[in-house]
Structures are given as C-alpha cells and as structure tokens.
Image: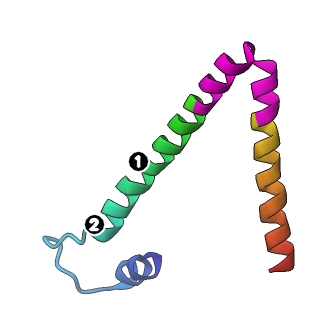
Amino acid sequence: MAQIQDEMKQFEGMPDNIKVDYTGEIEEQNKQQMFLIGAFFSGLGLIMLILIFQFGGISKPLIIMIAIFLSFIGVFGGLMITG
C-alpha cells in the first residue's frame, strides 16, 4: 500500500477534481486490528482481576503477570536468534 501511495504522489497529469482514496480492505483490516487490541487488553484486565480476587492482594498477581510478560520476551528473543 505504501508503494502505491508513493507512486500516486509522483503521478502527474491527474485533474484537480479527482480524489484518490485508499480504503476498502485496508480500512476494514485496521478496524479489526483495533478491536483485537482492545479485546486483548480487556482480557488481560479480567485475568488480573480474577487473580487479585484469588490471591487476596495485588502483589502476587502483579508478579505473575510480569513473569508472563518477561517469558514472552524470552521466547520471541529466542525465536529471533535461532530463526
């Protein structure tokens, strides 16, 4: 999409009354991505809430969530190193 937009900026001879709009599949994909990001963080919040009720405090659930986050960093780092 970026390549098409760059090519269209360099295109000369287009009348002023014509407007090029980049919508459709990309717009729908962006909407779905924003929904999934919101659902992900909502899910994390609910998991944190359940852990707080289970452990009766915030320190242990916070340690658990930080450990999960750090394990993802380690996993993705290992995958990037080993290919």
Indicate which disc, 1 or 2, sits on the residue closer to the N terminus: 2
Q: Which mark is residue 35?
A: 1
| Quadrant of the rendering where the N terminus is positioned | bottom left
- Residue shown at the point (77%, 27%) measured from the top left: 62
Name the residue at 85% across, 68% down. 78
Q: Is residue 16 left or right of residue 12?
A: left
Quadrant of the image containing the C terminus: bottom right
Query: Height in image: 62 above or below 67?
Result: above
Q: Nearer the viewer, residue 75 or 54?
A: 54
Counting the numbered discs, the total is 2
Nearest the viewer among 43 and 3 is 43
In the drawing, what numbered circle is on residue 59?
none
Query: Which span is picked out in magenta?
Result: 47-64
| Residue drawn at point x = 81 percent, y = 24 percent | 60
Q: Is residue 22 visible?
A: no
Q: Position of residue 45 (x, y in %)?
A: 58, 30
In this view, the mark in front (1 or 2): 1
Q: Amino acid at mark 2?
A: Thr
Dot 1 amino acid type: Phe
